[in-house]
Image: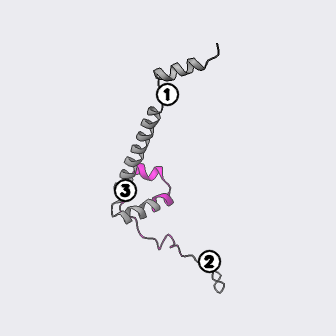
Amino acid sequence: MFRKSTGEATSSRPKEADAKPRTGTPSAATAAATSNGKLAYEARRAAKAGVSLDRWMADKQKRVQAEQEAERRAVKARTPTKPGLFKRLLDRAHKPI
């Protein structure tokens, strides 16, 4: 919302100074890999879950790795195998002479 009387723009979102402090400090690897906005978002999610930011990020990394492993296994399971006996016979029967 905008106030016309003071000329200042206000919104329902808190400013950086008004924002809640982060629970825990992120590790150096976590801080380097994410932006300040992303860290603030993850800090809010960690606070909502009731865990520290480091633990939240570690759990998130484990979830991402588990998803990647599941995707890798799914791709491996989708690799074509040798057609079965009936498939080969039908393919042979449909070929022109």
* Three-letter code for the amino acid on which mark 2 is drawn: Ala
Give the quarter of the image for residue 5. Answer: bottom right
Point out the stretch of residues depicted in magenta: 12-40
Image quarter where the C terminus lies is top right
Q: Is residue 27 part of the magenta span, yes or no?
A: yes
Residue under the point 39% across and 52% down? 60
Residue under the point 37% across and 56% down? 56
Residue 31 percent across, percent down from the top left:
44, 53
Disc 2/disc 3 C-alpha distance (Å): 34 Å
Q: Which residue is mark 1?
A: 80
Residue under the point 61% across and 18% down? 95
Q: Which residue is mark 3?
A: 56
**Mark 1 or mark 2, earlier in chain:** 2
**Mark 2 or mark 3, earlier in chain:** 2
Image quarter where the N terminus lies is bottom right
Which one is in front, 32 or 52? 52
For discs 2 and 3, the disc positioned in front in the rendered view: 3
Q: Is residue 27 left or right of residue 79?
A: left
Q: Which residue is mark 2?
A: 9
Q: For the residue labelled by badge 2, is the local secondary structure a helix, a strand or a loop?
A: loop
Q: Are marks 3 and 1 in contact (CB under 8 Å)?
A: no
Disc 3/disc 1 C-alpha distance (Å): 39 Å
Q: For the residue labelled by badge 3, is the local secondary structure a helix, a strand or a loop?
A: helix
Which one is in front, 61 or 26? 61
Residue 58 percent across, percent down from the top left:
36, 51
Q: Is residue 16 part of the magenta span, yes or no?
A: yes
Please identify the dominant SS of the magenta region. loop
